[in-house]
Amino acid sequence: MSEKKERFRRIRDLEENILSCVAVGDCKGAYKGPYSDPILTSSCINRDHGSGFEVNFARGRFTLCRALLDGKIEPSEGMAEVVYQCTLCGSCREVCNNCKNPDMVINARENIEDHVDIWESLRADLVDAGVAPLPRHKEIFEHQRTEHNPYMEKHAERWNWLADKADYFKPNGDYLFFVGCTSAYRLTDIAKIFLEIAKKSNFSLSLAKEEWCCGSVNFRTGVEDLGIETAKHNFETFKKLGIKKIVATCAGCYRTLKIDYPKWIDDWDFEVFHAIEVIDQEIQSGNIKIKNKIPGKMTYHDPCHLGRHNDLYEAPRRVAAAIAKDGLVEMRRNRANAFCCGAGGGVKSGFPDLALEVAVERIHEAEETEAEWLVNCCPFCLGNLGDAAKAASSSLKVVDLLDLVNKAI
């Protein structure tokens, strides 16, 4: 028994939470369609795009956890392949026990507390058991251990996109801008645009020359040792600069710095902001003036790491509404009940076809609004939704909200 406890120590620590699932099945069968109550339109991506087996949903994964703890099944690579098809979006938590149902006496959602924390713990236990992560993830992390990014790029090239390095590698900014890997190696325009916005506004930014990947990909896929090593390195780097406010343009970096780092670093004492929060504050205070409103209706996609994971819903909407000449319109599923883009939790790298298929559904939902612009605040969402728009031959313009802000001020 002690051996099994050591093997699955994380989910065993959460056993009471796991046993709180009363198997109602809203995580699998939450209704889909233009209903008046938005709780009925949220759904797990695997309902329509996965295999549809019970283990693809929260109820089935809770059963899986119980079976592992009871010694009824052994971990396997096949098990890991199913578990890693989840994007960790948190939609299951929102519809759990259909929490708006007045006839439900026991609120399983409150007792379970955080579904996503349990799924991440399960993944970490599968890593310890030697059956995870997925082969593609292993390749990525082998590279990351030496080059500190998941994109198979050289660490020495992290700042190649930045022209005036000397101006930013100084600890004198109002905020430390954590650029992240996606903006450093793939979508570099996002980082450049935020620097431009800061220059036009009333706040200054510094950059950490020794910045590594935030570690989100590690924590999401259960490779805790690499995530912790990365977090501790970045923490020491931040301390040397002496700046207490950190801002990120990436929703994944923001979530990791704000939620994960405090779990692993006892004396973490930094304030963490998303760039859109800073811009919203600057607009509200009058420090940013809107000069040229953007023609065409906009609709906003809620990144899971900003929305369900951090309850950051209104700031991006206020900013979008401030710059939209023809208004902001909502998709059928929005805010806490928004449909995931399909890229998170390692799905984009592990199951690219699944990620694209999910994003195409979100594109079609955005098209229903008749908006011209699909805006968001996450480079991962931006990339996957952009791929989906091309695959679906959609006329939607998929952009980061920062891009339009820069054009409007």
Image: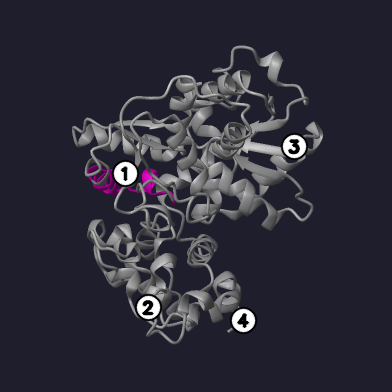
Q: Which residue is mark 1?
A: 352
Looking at the picture, does residue 120 appear above or below residue 239? below
User: Could you tell me which secondary element the residue under label 2 belongs to?
Assistant: loop
Which secondary structure class fits the magenta region best? helix
Q: Mark 3 against mark 2, which lies toward the viewer?
A: 2
Looking at the picture, does residue 215 appear above or below residue 187? below
Closer to the camera in the image, 376 or 13: 376
Q: Which residue is mark 3?
A: 238
- The quadrant holding residue 15 is bottom right
Q: Residue at position x 33%, y 31% from top?
A: 326
Residue 186 visible in the current orientation: no
Residue 402 visible in the current orientation: yes
Separation of marks 1 and 2 at Cα, in angstroms: 36 Å
Separation of marks 4 and 1 at Cα, in angstroms: 39 Å
Closer to the camera in the image, 47 or 325: 325
Q: Residue at position x 41%, y 24% from top?
A: 293
Report the amino acid beneath label 3: Phe
Marked residue nearer the N-terminal end (4 or 2): 4
In the rendered structure, the answer to whether residue 289 lies left or right of residue 393 reads right
Marked residue nearer the N-terminal end (4 or 1): 4
Rendering coords of residue 238 (x, y %): 74, 37
Q: Residue at position x 41%, y 45% from top?
A: 136
Rendering coords of residue 223 (x, y %): 55, 53
In the rendered structure, the answer to whether residue 265 lies left or right of residue 375 reads right
Q: Please report the bounds of the magenta region as a residue range.
A: 345-364
Q: Which residue is mark 2?
A: 101
